[in-house]
Image: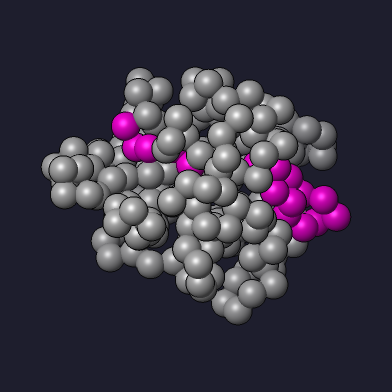
Amino acid sequence: MSDSSACSVVSNPEVRLEDVRWHDRSNTCDGRGRETASSRGYNAERLAHVVMNQLGFRSVSFESWYDDYVLSTDNMSYEVEVKSCIDRYETASGEEGGYGQFRIWKPHHDRILEEHEKLAEHGQGGLYFFVVYTVEHSIEKEIGKLVAPVEMVDDVLNTWLVSDHVTMGSKKNRQISWRLLLKKLGVSRERFENEPIINLLDE
């Protein structure tokens, strides 16, 4: 087991998604559904920022293809794409449905990968920050979170489909359940749920 808290890119592994809702400009949505998922997605970006930075709950992004920009203690810089999903979808009857899925947009993914490959020798990398949550009493509760290098995630994405999205339009994307992503990255569910954060950058 790695000591994630000692890694230069992780400053505050103990901060959880449910902690973020109480801070300035965060979302305090209740329940389930597309609207709450979107709001919690913005909170996930704030979570990623505070987990990987010493101060502040505001994410910083200079371009449209990533969500946060992080400077590590060893002078590396990272473009960070943040993805969140619920643990299980809910059916129309209120029962548990399939496992929640992350949606990764190919144009954004390719750009982060391209920037990393072009600038790696100058100390710039690309990262994904994944967080999974459940909903208890209408409020989100983090199940686990994970940081992975963009090239590691690229290795497990082998199928892209075109779909329409309200903000992205018609673009290629990959939807992958969080359980399948963990399996492909070699991370057990037990480890994901029990460690404050899984950091694959150093593994």
Q: Main secondary structure of the magenta part?
A: strand
> Is 67 in front, or is 161?
67
Q: Which quadrant holds the C terminus?
A: top left
Q: Judge left or right: residue 88 versus residue 118.
A: right
Task: Place residue 161 in its image quadrant.
Answer: top left
Residue displayed at 32% across by 45% down = 126
- Identify the residue at image location x=43%, y=36%: 202
Q: Nearer the viewer, residue 89 or 157?
A: 157
Residue 105 lies, in percent from the top left, at: 36, 41
> Of all residues shown, which one is farthest toward the bottom?
24
Residue 145 visible within the image = no
The image position of residue 125, as x and y in percent, is: 28, 45
Q: Which residues are magenta?
A: 134-151
The image position of residue 178, as x and y in percent, is 58, 32
Residue at 77% in and 58% down: 139
Q: Is residue 75 left or right of 122 when viewed as pictured?
A: right
Q: Is residue 69 above or below residue 136?
A: below
Q: Could you tell whether 198 is left or right of 159 in the image?
A: right
Q: Position of residue 37 (x, y in %)?
A: 61, 53
Judging depth in this view, the residue of 142 and 8 nearest the camera is 8
